[in-house]
Amino acid sequence: MIRPRGTVVIVGVPHTSATVALPISAMVVNERKVIGSFMGSTRLHVDVPWLVELYRNGRLKLDELITTRYPLEQINEAIAAMETGAALRNVIVF
């Protein structure tokens, strides 16, 4: 499913012994790449302040992505809403 000269990025944290089989000939002939990404290659000390500044300036719209905010005491309702599809992004407020 990788286009010629395309790249697959492996994300997540697999088990240390996890392996994958690849069609090597197709990878070479079509110049395809497979790379890993640990936490999105985030530079926390640079990226987080930048994202916070974007949010504070109204250029990173996060609040609009929240479906509902629930107090901790209603966490079961939040989970049920997510499971039924009634809510996409719930926030639990402590």
Image (spheres, rainbow, N blue to C red):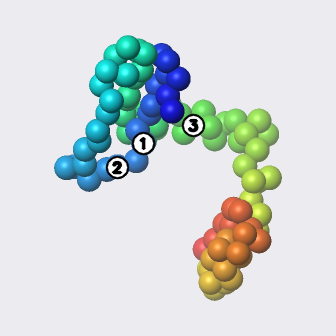
What is the CA distance from the residue labelled 1 to the residue labelled 2? 7 Å
Looking at the picture, how far across and down is residue 27, in whole percent? 37, 22
Q: As displayed, is residue 85 above or below residue 21? A: below
**Could you say which quadrant of the image residue 61 lies in?**
top right
Q: Quadrant of the C terminus?
A: bottom right
| Residue that badge 3 annotates | 49
What residue would you read off at disc 2? 13
Q: Is residue 85 above or below residue 54?
A: below
Sequence order check, earlier mark of 3 and 1 = 1
Could you tell me which residue is drawn at 77 percent across and 71 percent down?
86
- Amino acid type at circle 2 is Val
Residue 88, compared with residue 39, is above or below; it is: below
Q: Residues within 10 Å of mark 3 (few under 14, many from 20)?
A: few
Expressed as whole percent of the image width and height from the top left, the position of residue 90 reads: 68, 67
Please state the horizontal and vertical placement of residue 63, each as a whole percent of the image.
76, 53
Number of the front mark, 3 or 1: 1
**Mark 1 crowd level (few <14, some 14–19, many ≥20, 10 Å Cα):** few
The answer to whether residue 69 shows anywhere in this view is no
- Label 1 element class: loop
The residue singled out by tag 1 in the image is 11
In the shown orientation, is residue 90 left or right of residue 10?
right
Asked if one can make out residue 84 in the rendered structure from this viewpoint, the answer is: yes
Determine the secondary structure under disc 3.
Answer: helix
